[in-house]
Image: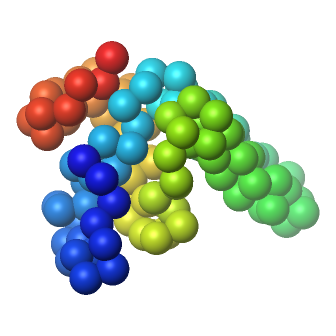
Amino acid sequence: MTEPNMDEKYKTYAEFWPYYLSEHQKPETRGLHYFGTGLGIALMIATAILLDWTLIPAALISGYLFAWIGHFFVERNRPATFTYPLWSFASDFRMLGLWLIGKLDAEYAKANIDAS
């Protein structure tokens, strides 16, 4: 699945989700996403516990840094965040959650995408 041209932008999140999955086919890319998202969550929790608001930029940077490394150097594609920032952000958490509960493979199968 490829990025739609400007006239074919995804109009619903349901249309976007299979595209998002297709941009994360390699396990290494997903692993970098999980690490970055997990680190971002941990830093946000630390922010709340310590009331140290200076950790917020580190939380955001860590989440995106590891994901973008995966896209540029492993998957060799353009991060969906550049075109669909909110849906991509939500999908990072959805992908992580589905992986944690063992249901991500079923999502790939439903979208008919090889994720090996």
Q: Nearer the viewer, residue 1 or 67?
A: 1
Locate residue 34: give its quadrant: top right
User: How far across and down, in percent of the image, does residue 106 sit?
Assistant: 16, 27
From this view, report whether residue 78 is shown above or below residue 12: above
Who's the residue at 71% across and 47% down the image? 65
User: How far across and down, in percent of the image, does residue 70 sit?
Assistant: 59, 36
From this view, report whether residue 98 is shown above or below residue 8: above
Q: Would residue 49 be found to the left or right of residue 14 on screen?
A: right
Q: Would residue 42 be found to the left or right of residue 116 on screen?
A: right
Looking at the image, the residue that sits furthest to the bottom is: 7
Which quadrant of the rendered structure holds the C terminus? Answer: top left
Residue 103 seen anywhere in this rendered image of the structure? no
Q: Would residue 109 be found to the left or right of residue 83 on screen?
A: left
Who's the residue at 53% across and 23% down the image? 28
Residue 81 seen anywhere in this rendered image of the structure? yes
User: How far across and down, in percent of the image, does residue 110 sit?
Assistant: 9, 35
Locate residue 35: give its quadrant: top right
Q: Would residue 68 be found to the left or right of residue 53 on screen?
A: left
User: How far across and down, in percent of the image, does residue 59 sit?
Assistant: 74, 53
Who's the residue at 71% across and 57% down the image? 60
Q: How many marks?
A: 0
Who's the residue at 33% across and 60% down the image? 3
